[in-house]
Image (spheres, rainbow, N blue to C red):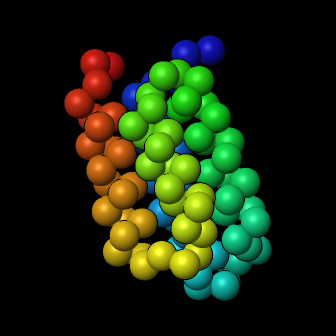
Amino acid sequence: MKVTKKQRINSIFYILIQFEQMIDGSTDVTEETYRNYLDRVNVWYLGRGDEEIGYAIEGLKKMGKDVSHETVRRIVFHMIDILNKEVP
């Protein structure tokens, strides 16, 4: 099954949603589940050869919850911009 560009973008945007839910504490998203999601997405992108996105995800994982919402938002939208520039 081929993953569409929209699905790839959604997987990246979900990083921001997971971070917000982790910080908010109103859901069952913990730092561990957030990092687990980052791991899964990172393996997929590195496997595809998208090293720039993989490195950004790895950086977010290393920072965990010790990073500002603004930084996570900027990184997520930077990765989405990279994906938008790819050929469909």
In screen coordinates, is 39 left or right of 28? Answer: left
Report the side of 10 relative to 65 (left or right).
left
Q: Quick check: 61 above or below 80?
A: below
Pick the front one: 88 or 19? 19
Q: Residue at x 59, y 58 (%)?
A: 61
Q: How many marks?
A: 0
Q: Position of residue 28 (x, y in %)?
A: 76, 74
For residue 66, what is the image quadrant? bottom right
Relative height, residue 81 to residue 13 (above, below): above
Please, is residue 36 above or below residue 69 in the view? above
Q: Is residue 27 visible to the viewer in this orientation of the structure? A: yes
Please say whether residue 7 is visible from this viewpoint. Answer: no
Instruction: From the top left corner, tell me how far across and down residue 11 is, in percent.
Output: 52, 44
In what quadrant of the picture does the N terminus appear?
top right
Which residue shows up at 35% across the image and 74% down it? 70
Residue ID at (64%, 34%): 43
